[in-house]
Image (cartoon, rainbow, N blue to C red):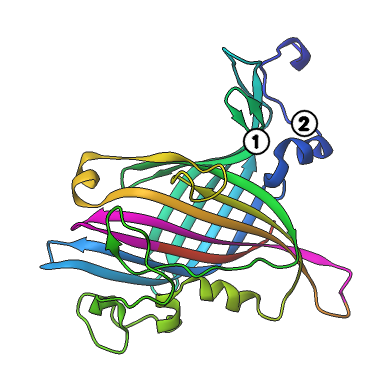
């Protein structure tokens, strides 16, 4: 039977069609590799402290594959819509030890505008994490000329339900102060990790593109927290152990897909670079503890 005789059969479309169907996700398929940083204050009941502050310089491998065809969603109060997307596998290891830190299979979706509910075009990420979490995080995408702008990433814990501290707010927890030895922090401090990076991990992203000429940037801005970014929507699910011991309450992430110009004499050529910052709020001991991950990756295939 031919594909045309089976309307729901998902087969790959021509490349030019895919650029339109995938929207802001069109450049993702392929393999991206690079480096970054991970900060997580994890509970340490077993060690006799509220937290252990884990700091990692990271190596990352991120592979995206296009889903072959349209994904139909059937309407009951409006016409059907079609989603297009990519599935991915993210693998992160410690740069200094080679130890595994994170593995995450998931999907990014391009969601068209709808009339019921009345909503503009959005992007959504569906992620599964082996600790026992599943996340749906949704938001907006847009393009800008030139390089990205990086707001500070907060690493200061704060009371559950309260606003995040302002950039530069004092951190009362000694584990975060690298000048003072602390047995409840990664020791020795990884060679590439500085106090500035611990205070604002996004400073590592800014340093990575210093001196680069970035001509265009596609921005994917998603969050589970309504109102945090335009069209934010979603939520998290955690196994009961995590709900009690370290509840993943909120996820926010920004991905920048950048078109980078080669230096002279090859200024007419470009390559693709992906940067991201992600903050996961872990709720325990009456506080929200920001778990921040950042990375700068280059598209290699």
In three-dimensional space, the C-alpha distance between marks 2 and 1, rounded to whole angstroms, equals 24 Å
Q: In the image, what residue occupies the spot 26% across and 62% down? A: 42
| Highlighted range, magenta | 266-291
From the viewer's side, name the closer residue of 100 and 269: 269
Q: Quadrant of the N terminus?
A: top right
The secondary structure type at the circle numbered 1 is loop
x, y percent for residue 113: 67, 31
- Residue 88 in view of the camera: yes
Residue occupying the far bottom of the picture: 179
Indicate whether 224 appears above or below 75: below
Residue 211 magenta-highlighted: no
**Marks 2 and 1 close (CB-CB < 8 Å):** no
What residue is rendered at 54% in x and 59% in y? 61
Where's residue 156, x and y in %? Answer: 34, 69
Residue lying at 63% horizontally and 16% vertically, measured from the top left: 78
**Total marks drawn?**
2
Q: Where is mark 1, residue-wise?
A: 120
- Residue 159, image x, y percentages: 26, 60
Name the element at disc 2. Answer: loop
For image coordinates 47% across by 58% down, the residue present is 278
Q: Nearer the viewer, residue 262 or 113?
A: 113
- Mark 2 is surrounded, within 10 Å at the Cα level, by few (under 14), some (14 to 19) or many (20 or more) other residues, namely few
Q: Nearer the viewer, mark 2 or mark 1?
A: 1
Looking at marks 2 and 1 on the same chain, the residue that comes earlier in the sequence is marked by 2
In the rendered view, tell whether residue 292 sits above or below residue 238. below
Q: Kindly report the secondary structure that dominates the magenta region of the rendered protein.
A: strand
Q: Which residue is mark 2?
A: 13
The quarter of the picture where residue 163 lies is bottom left
């Amino acid at each position: 039977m031919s594909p045309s005789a089976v309307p729901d059969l998902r087969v790959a479309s021509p490349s030019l069609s895919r650029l339109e169907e995938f929207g802001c996700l069109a450049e993702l398929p392929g393999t991206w590799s690079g480096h970054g940083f991970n900060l997580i204050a994890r509970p340490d009941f077993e060690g006799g402290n509220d937290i252990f502050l884990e700091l990692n310089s990271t190596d990352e491998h991120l592979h995206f594959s296009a889903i072959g065809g349209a994904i139909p969603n059937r309407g009951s109060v409006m016409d059907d819509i079609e989603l297009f997307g990519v599935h991915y596998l993210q693998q992160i290891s410690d740069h200094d030890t080679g130890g595994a830190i994170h593995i995450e299979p998931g999907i990014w979706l391009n969601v068209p505008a709808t009339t019921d509910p009345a909503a503009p075009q959005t992007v959504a990420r569906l992620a599964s994490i082996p600790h026992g979490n599943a996340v749906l995080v949704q938001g907006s995408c847009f393009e800008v000329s030139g390089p990205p702008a990086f707001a500070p990433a907060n690493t200061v814990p704060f009371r559950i339900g309260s606003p995040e501290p302002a950039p530069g707010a004092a951190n009362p927890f000694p584990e975060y102060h690298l000048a003072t030895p602390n047995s409840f922090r990664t020791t020795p401090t990884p060679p590439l990790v500085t106090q500035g990076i611990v205070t604002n991990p996004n400073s590592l992203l800014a340093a990575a593109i210093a001196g680069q000429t970035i001509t265009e940037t596609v921005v994917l801005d998603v969050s589970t927290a309504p109102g945090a970014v335009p069209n934010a929507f979603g939520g998290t699910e955690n196994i009961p152990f995590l709900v009690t011991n370290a509840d993943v309450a909120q996820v926010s992430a920004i991905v920048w897909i950048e078109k980078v110009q080669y230096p002279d004499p090859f200024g007419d050529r470009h390559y693709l670079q992906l940067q991201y910052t992600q903050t996961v709020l872990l709720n325990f001991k009456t506080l929200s503890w920001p778990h921040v991950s950042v990375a700068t990756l280059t598209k290699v295939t």
